[in-house]
Amino acid sequence: MKIVRELLSITQEEFADAIEVETLTIKRIENGITRTSKRTHDLFYDFVYKKKIYLNKIKEMFYKEELTNEILLFHGAKSAILGDINISKSRKNNDFGQGFYCGESYEQSASFVENFENSSVYYFSFDTSNLKCMKYDVNREWMLTIAYFRETLNKYKDSSIIKNLISKLDNIDYVIAPTIDNKMFSYIKKVRLY
């Protein structure tokens, strides 16, 4: 709340009036004396939405400010991830093989899971100096690689195009790619390989 208030250059009193709560409530929340009630939380989010303040972008900026020689990646999950992340236990038909992959945008990862009741967005930072990365943009290579690992291109697995795409992932330690949802994947399945 304090960050939003400072972005708008308004006092605690003005902010309290704007979201229709007592000034004392804002003071207590900002000083960590009390937690935000559901009502105040909802009023706050209505306020930032109307002001077109993108909280996810602000969160991402703060996360990135703390980095030195590390990379920061995000992963949206429909439910909580239990235990340690282990690529050998990753599910089959994952978008980039059996590995665990992330994107560079908090907002994109959050938008993928925002409609699921128990969703979470995780962020990971690590030193990349001794690791090999494969980075995808939303393009044909990204689309075909996803379709291959989701096993919808099995009849093309011996084609030179597919073999070339998959060989690029040999010895890769981590993948950075936009997240794909099932609606997008349904569209991808209709695309023909030429």
Image: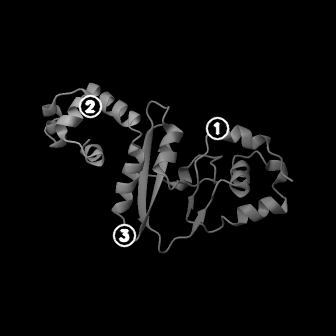
Identify the disc placed on residue 68.
Answer: 3
Identify the disc placed on residue 182.
Answer: 1
Q: Is residue 35 visible?
A: no
The residue under label 2 is which amino acid type? Ala
Q: How crowded is the residue under tag 1: few (<14 C-alpha within 10 Å), some, or many (20+)?
A: few
Q: Nearer the viewer, mark 3 or mark 2?
A: 2
Task: Give the mark nearer the N terminus: 1 vs 3.
Answer: 3
Front position in the image: 178 or 29: 29
On screen, residue 26 versus residue 7, left or right, reads left
Q: Position of residue 16 (x, y in %)?
A: 21, 32
Which of the 4 image quadrants contains residue 65? bottom left
Q: Position of residue 139 (x, y in %)?
A: 69, 55
Q: Does the residue at mark 1 contact the one at mark 3 (Cβ under 8 Å)? A: no
Q: Position of residue 183 (x, y in %)?
A: 66, 36
Disc 2 target residue: 18
Which of the 4 image quadrants contains residue 81? top left
Identify the disc placed on residue 128.
Answer: none
Give how far apart the Cα atoms at labels 1 and 3 are.
Answer: 35 Å
On screen, residue 171 versus residue 27, left or right, reads right
The residue under label 1 is which amino acid type? Asn
SS of the residue at dot 1? helix
Q: How crowded is the residue under tag 3: few (<14 C-alpha within 10 Å), some, or many (20+)?
A: few
Front position in the image: 56 or 180: 56
* Residue drawn 28% across the image and 25% down it: 39
Q: Nearer the viewer, mark 1 or mark 3?
A: 3
**Colour style of the rendered protein structure:** one colour
Give how far apart the Cα atoms at labels 3 and 2 are.
Answer: 38 Å
Residue most toward the bottom?
130
The number of numbered badges drawn on the structure is 3
